[in-house]
Amino acid sequence: MTENDVAAGMRLKEMAGWNQSESDWKRFLHASKDGCFVAEVDGVVCGSAATIIYGGRFAWVGMVLVDPAYRGRGIGTKLLERCIEHLDSAGVPCIKLDATPLGKPIYKKLGFVTEYELERWILKREAKDAEILGPADKMPGPLLDFVLKADSEAFGADRGAILRSVHEEEPRFTDGLWNAGGLEGYAFGRHGSFADHLGPWIAKDSSTGERLLERFLEQSVRESVIVDCRAANPFVKKLLQAKGFAFARPLTRMFRGKNAFPGISELVCAILGPEFG
């Protein structure tokens, strides 16, 4: 895949009803120009898959899409096998992904096993006037560095380059809560094609999680907001329900290989997104 294929990738994700933007495709290409792939039939792009290696600890596979008109031909499986081949050749010890119910059986056949369950929740509300927000307050560099270091521990690997890109595109969504003991939680967010997406959303307790969620919703003006939460989190779904979110669909975090760096899943309220982890 090259940047010339981004328009084709956007066409595939629109057909699937996904929320990614052109910026998300370019994040993959910038991070892993040799690890993003498309499938073509008669010169037409009919499938995609993309990878990112996080600090040599594990890799992520995302944006696995097949044009509905070409499904049933094994194109998705071939793309996944190409991703696995690329990552195995790079010596990556573990490959991770977040599977939709449609994709989960395919991943199981390729040796992926379940790590934990996720759930997508969506808020529908009346859009707000962006002018009420005023200028964005950008998190100072030293504080952002501190947050990114904490994220590498919560996530299990350094994904600072991706989060810096997310932060630069929309700094008003980047948030952190501190007390005398240190960082209690943090959040980032993105503008998707039809909804704002909260994540990663990391909190040590319900109170911190609630404050971060409220502050994000204050900064977001769009009609739709998406959150991909960890299903086993003891408080996150109650917080989402209280704000009017509704359950949309399940997801499953899966891995292949040795999961030596699982991160600290009990801190995870919501992930960055199925495409990035």
Image (tube, rainbow, N blue to C red):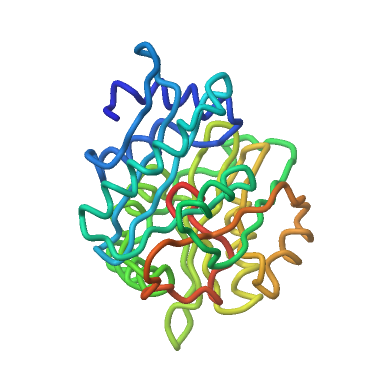
Q: Is residue 202 above or below residue 90?
A: below
In-front residue for pair 270/187:
270
Q: How many marks?
A: 0
Q: Give the x, y percent position of residue 154.
A: 43, 72
Which residue extends farthest top? 42
Residue situated in front as seen by the camera: 251 or 41? 41
Side (left or right) of 234 relative to 196: right
Percent across and percent down for residue 252 are: 59, 57
* Quadrant of res 23: top left
Query: What residue sits 79% from the left and 61% below the top?
Result: 242
Give x and y (percent) for residue 57.
Answer: 29, 67
Which of the image's four quarters has the N terminus? top left
At 33% from the left and 34% from the top, the residue drawn is 37
Viewer-closest of 259 and 167? 259
Identity of the residue drawn at 51% across and 27% down: 73
Of residues 230 and 85, the one drawn nearer to the viewer in this rendering: 85
Q: Residue at x 68, y 67 (%)?
A: 236
Measured as percent of width and height from the top left, residue 82 is found at: 33, 41
Taking 179 as reference, is 126 left or right? right
Image quarter in which the C terminus is found: bottom left
65 left or right, relative to 128 = left
Displayed quadrant of residue 40? top left
